[in-house]
Image (cartoon, helix red, strand yellow):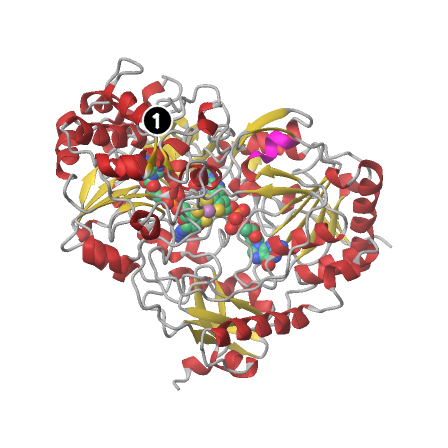
Amino acid sequence: MSAASSLPLNASHWGAFRAEVEGGRLRRILPFEHDPRPSGMTGVWPEMLDHPLRVAQPVARKGWLSGDKGAARGEDSYVALGWDEALDLAAAEIGRIRATHGNGALFGGSYGWSSAGRIHHARTLVRRFFGAIGGHVDQETNYSYGAAMAFVPRIVGRDMIGASLTSAASIREHCDIFLAFGGLPLKNWEIQAGGVGEHRYDSFMAGVTGRVRAVNISPCREDIEEKFGIEWLPVRPNTDAALLMALAQVVVAEGKADRAFLTSHVNDAQPYLDYLAGKTDGTPKTPEWAETITGIPAATIRDLGRALPGKRVMVSLNWSLQRARHGEQPYWAAIALACVLGQVGLPGGGFAFGYGSSNAMGNPEYRTPLYGLPGIPNATGLSIPCARVADMLLNPGAEYRYDGETRVYPEVKLVYWAGGNPFHHHQDLNRLREAFRRPETVIVNEGYWTATARHADIVFPATVTLERDDIGGASRDRYLLAMQKLVAPHEYARDDYDIFAALARRLGDAEAFTEGRSSDDWLDWAWSRISTNLAARGVNVPTYEDFRAQGYLAMPEPQESYVMLSDFRADPVAHPLSTPSGRIELFSAQAAAEPGQPGHPVWLDPEEWLGRATDAAPLHLLTPQPKRKLHGQMDFSAYSRAGKVQDRELLQINPADAAARGIAEGDALRVFNARGACFAIARIDPGLMAGVVVLPTGATYDPDGLTDRSSNPNVLTRDIGTSELGQGCAAQSCLVEVARHDGPLPPLRVTAPPPIQAKED
Ligand SMILES: Nc1nc2c(c(=O)[nH]1)N[C@H]1C(S)=C(S)[C@@H](COP(=O)(O)OP(=O)(O)OC[C@H]3O[C@@H](n4cnc5c(=O)[nH]c(N)nc54)[C@H](O)[C@@H]3O)O[C@H]1N2
Ligand SMILES: Nc1nc2c(c(=O)[nH]1)N[C@H]1C(S)=C(S)[C@@H](COP(=O)(O)OP(=O)(O)OC[C@H]3O[C@@H](n4cnc5c(=O)[nH]c(N)nc54)[C@H](O)[C@@H]3O)O[C@H]1N2
Ligand SMILES: [Mo]
């Protein structure tokens, strides 16, 4: 055993690591010895553990203490409190609202990427806490692929993202053409929910280069690194559905559609085929039609369409494509193209969502056993699609359509957030700010002074993973990870588990939340389940102590390469899908019930896209995941800041668009539209389509009126659901203008905690 591998292990969503601790302080991070390509983010921990932006003690907002009803939220100073006093205040407030308005007035908002460990997983704890005290308004789906999560199961009967994708081995061996919509960006493979043992980007890319013809279909060339020599087909943002339709139209019109597959495995392909042929609306969905929408020459589309029949084709779409208005449609159109080509369920072929979105997509199913605290049913039965949070707060009692139902927004009086950052992740942050002024009370558990903590009335200082024992891992990763407490909690920070247990005790519901267990007891509980699960699979299970001493446990290597939907392909009668027809629905009665939806895949105008560019907002803004951080986390680490200039994020802009605005490389920029404005630094990129600008997410919102002093693109994005079908986040449909900013950049306020007064006794 080398010296490094005898050091204690811990893990984050960006990777497992070993830690050198000296005198109770974290000295150094070493990458996990089995990780072939560790993320640069792993090194942030020594700096982030005792960062000046850590929340040090419980605090309450001054205005809230004097009954301002939320007016100064986001602008106020705080008063430091002792733990008992803060817990008493919070519990009394939760109890008061529960007694006055019922549990349906309590919103347990905790969407977000908290700890990789399962026992201290904040979202599970929020839900369990509210379950224990009688229920709350919950959130469903996610920001990552919310539209697909709600809609795709209606079409193919399963969550095709949570389930395994056709394995990388199957692609390597069988695929001829890999259509990579949104590319395969290396940066996204740094991350995997639950903790990464192995970053396997290199081996995945080895499989889609070489023999396979891969095409990067994206506005942005660098969505696949140039060194891979992969073809680049620039497409206007939000128009992939039109391209997919034209490719299908070419195949059908040339008599190459797999009619047998469309008959045996598809429910009613005819309305879609009629739509492609122009029989329903007089417009055949030809390459010439798609050229006007996508910006891709018709001849290029026709050549690509002609190349597909007879080949093993994988139609791969990133999650970003559905994070747009009518984002359900490109996914449905991709499923339809795979059906027209008869590729679904064949080795190395078919459709897939997310190969370019997260580490380990295409890994075999390791079935790594992971157990978080069990859920307690939510007695109110209330929940909203998570991306509709501002709508809910602004429009209590209003009706909305979602997933084939009419629902009503509840009237929320108290918001509790732990393990997420809506002032990072939500769209139109100035609108969210308005919405966050509505509830009577906002409580947040956070490790850092994020923009969300700054909009709370009570902030509880939460520990971070390095301050707790836990077990992490991901079902598609080879390693179960023993996450070990390395240092004592920062200042007065406590575990979310202990915070919720203390609140439940004050509310008279302690037993329901804890079942008499401490978090260490729950770890033992989890380990015994893990051991039983693994023993049943014939794995030689170590003792808990040995597992912790080693730091990890490798799962047995699955034997076969996996092919998504192969059972259904082989026998659709014996293995029907759980759709109304048991087959792939290219016609869906549920979709047809919504206004403007014909019931088959359809090109719908996303309202804010290059086809509707205006003089005031002529550029399409894309806001992808950041390279040097996980969302808003670590924004103030030296690692993240090394990717910025003057503490602002870089905005990619095409040379022609820059020249037209007198913008040179490195210039400070103002990015704006009618919703808001923020600042960025110009990075001129000929590998970006003209008319498109790219500003990644993650900068800490630092509002000054409607302007963010920093670079958070969510002051610009539109807060609207993808459609009634999925009500997902539609951040990628956004028009803006960019101008050179010649004056000095405004100083940032969010680099230090808000003013906190010592308590007056
Ligand atoms: N414009 C635009 N917006 C987007 C996207 C986009 O593409 N474009 N992408 C969306 C997507 S896919 C996502 S997933 C969201 C991500 O949005 P979030 O998940 O909300 O973003 P994070 O910054 O990861 O927030 C997690 C927070 O949890 C805190 N935390 C970590 N561990 C703990 C813990 O143990 N306890 C507690 N109490 N807190 C903890 C961290 O400090 C951090 O502030 O953003 C969405 N927003
Ligand atoms: N480093 C890092 N990696 C991450 C994360 C992070 O915060 N940091 N977050 C993780 C999370 S939570 C998630 S959900 C995934 C998200 O995974 P994705 O949603 O796939 O990631 P994005 O970066 O939003 O988008 C990927 C690329 O899609 C392209 N694109 C955007 N819109 C369009 C379009 O309309 N058409 C086409 N053809 N291409 C388009 C953009 O050029 C962008 O670079 O990433 C994960 N990986
Ligand atoms: Mo995500």
Image-quadrant location for residue 81 = bottom right
- The answer to whether residue 262 is above or below residue 2 is above
| Residue 150: x %, y % from top left | 49, 38
Looking at the rendering, the stretch of residues picked out in magenta corresponds to: 388-392
Q: Is residue 471 magenta?
A: no
Tell me the element at label 1.
strand
Which residue in the rendered view is the most extreme toward the bottom? 1
Give left or right: position of 700 versus 169. Answer: right
Identify which amino acid the numbered label 1 is placed on: Leu
Q: Residues within 10 Å of mark 1 (few under 14, many from 20)?
A: many
- The answer to whether residue 46 is above or below residue 20 is above
Q: Is residue 275 visible?
A: yes
Count of all numbered marks drawn on residues in the image: 1
| Residue 392: x %, y % from top left | 63, 31
Q: Residue at x 47, y 42 (%)?
A: 149
In this rendered view, identify the residue nearer to me: 682 or 21: 21
Which residue in the rendered view is the most extreme toward the top? 282
